[in-house]
Image: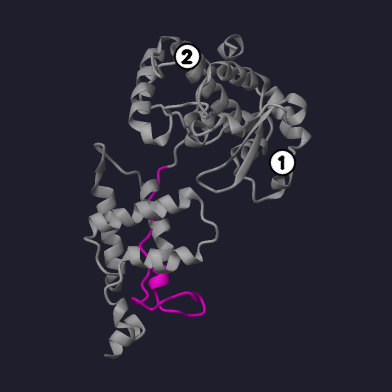
């Protein structure tokens, strides 16, 4: 009986509380304006737990069960490939707040519910340090030219793909933030006609406003001439991701690039290009510095940011195609 009181705070209703119950009845209340991306990460790790751990009750949480979960994540193949250590570590970090809620309440864990005993979390897996892949100017030119051979989307495929490349490289949004843009997110009059895109990043919930480089503005204006929907890139949303990536692989093949390249690599290329010339601007463009001093310039970018955007070199095909 004393053990039961310690584990469940004297509440027998908590005896079979699951991880999802803990999330829905307790953690959601503590989250401060969570982004769509954050909520999705919690849902995904809970789904993984239910699938791999037979949805065991929270009272069974221990170092051993969490290590077993870590091992199952490492052994499970996703589309024929194992998860990377970085992905597994991220899932365990997402699981952390739920585990802390289940631990006993004390001065270091004031929100603890006492649903299981405290235990030491397993060590993170060793992550391989990789230099991020970035596209060369030659590779971006090849992708831009190969877009002329695409037949998807049905209407104006070359213009659509080329605008994606130019926007991804010069503005650096996350891929699905870019592909989810609507024309209402584009302000062609911003900054005395310089133009900007503004959106709320799905992953962080932070609002970003990124001024447009002239070449990006020209591509958007050309795309708008043909547009018949609210979206800049209709058919490119997450709900159609399989068709999108099938055509992306086709485009890579046409351009003579490895099919291991990702659209997201344009974001890395954008950051690298800015940071090489204007340290700190890449962080601002990508939204990584919004909680620091540069965030004060969020709506009205500093002269340095605007100068960096103007001076960012672009592949020759980008300039000739618009």
- The Cα–Cα distance between marks 2 and 1, rounded to whole angstroms, is 32 Å
Earlier in the chain: of badge 2 and badge 1, it is 2
Pointer 1 local density, CA inside 10 Å: few below 14, some 14–19, many at least 20: few
SS category of the residue bearing label 1: loop
Q: Nearer the viewer, residue 242 or 1?
A: 242
Position of residue 168 in the picture relative to residue 124 (left or right): right
Task: State the residue in front, 204 or 119.
Answer: 204
Residue positioned most to the bottom:
2
Identify the residue at image location x=55%, y=43%: 201
Q: Is residue 264 magenta?
A: no
Q: Is residue 245 left or right of residue 200?
A: left
- How many neighbours does mark 2 have within 10 angstroms: few (below 14), some (14-19), or many (20 or more)? some
In this rendering, the count of numbered labels is 2
Identify which residue, 239 or 41, lies in the foreground: 239
The answer to whether residue 298 is seen in the rendering is yes
138 vs 40: above or below:
above
Magenta stretch prevailing secondary structure: loop
Say which residue appears at 65% left-offset and 34% top-offset: 210
**Mark 1 lies on residue:** 299
Q: Which mark is residue 52?
A: none
Q: According to the image, label 2 marks what residue?
A: 158
Picture coordinates of residue 208, whole percent (x, y) = 62, 41
Residue 194 x, y percent position in the rendering: 72, 25
Where 65 falls versus 87 (above or below)? below
Extreme-front residue of the structure: 228
Position in image of residue 32 (x %, y %): 55, 61
**Residue 133 in sight:** no
Q: Quadrant of residue 55?
A: bottom left
Image quarter where the N terminus lies is bottom left
Q: From which residue to which does the magenta span run?
A: 99-128
């Amino acid at each position: 009986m004393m053990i039961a009181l310690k584990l469940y705070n004297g509440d027998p209703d908590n005896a079979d509380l699951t991880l999802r119950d803990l999330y829905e009845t307790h953690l959601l209340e503590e989250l401060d304006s969570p982004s769509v991306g954050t909520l999705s990460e919690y849902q995904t790790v809970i789904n993984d737990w239910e699938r791999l751990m037979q949805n065991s009750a929270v009272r069974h949480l221990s170092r051993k069960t969490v290590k077993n979960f870590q091992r199952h994540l490492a052994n499970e193949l996703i589309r024929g490939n194992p998860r990377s250590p970085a992905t597994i570590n991220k899932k365990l970090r997402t699981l952390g707040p739920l585990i802390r809620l289940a631990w006993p309440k004390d001065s270091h864990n004031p929100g603890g519910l006492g649903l299981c005993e405290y235990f030491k979390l397993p060590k993170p897996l060793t992550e391989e340090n990789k230099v991020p892949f970035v596209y060369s100017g030659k590779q971006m030119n090849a992708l831009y030219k190969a877009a002329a051979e695409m037949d998807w989307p049905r209407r104006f495929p070359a213009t659509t793909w080329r605008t994606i490349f130019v926007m991804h490289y010069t503005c650096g949004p996350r891929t699905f933030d870019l592909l989810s843009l609507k024309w209402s997110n584009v302000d062609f009059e911003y900054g005395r006609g310089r133009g900007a895109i503004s959106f709320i990043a799905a992953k962080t919930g932070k609002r970003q406003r990124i001024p447009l480089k002239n070449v990006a503005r020209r591509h958007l204006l050309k795309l708008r001439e043909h547009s018949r929907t609210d979206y800049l890139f209709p058919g490119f949303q997450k709900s159609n991701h399989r068709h999108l990536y099938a055509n992306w692989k086709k485009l890579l093949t046409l351009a003579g690039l490895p099919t291991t390249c990702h659209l997201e690599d344009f974001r890395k290329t954008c950051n690298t290009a800015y940071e090489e010339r204007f340290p700190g601007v890449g962080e601002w463009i990508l939204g990584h510095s919004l909680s620091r001093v540069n965030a004060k310039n969020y709506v009205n970018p500093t002269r340095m940011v605007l100068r960096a955007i103007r001076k960012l070199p672009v592949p020759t095909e980008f300039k000739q195609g618009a």
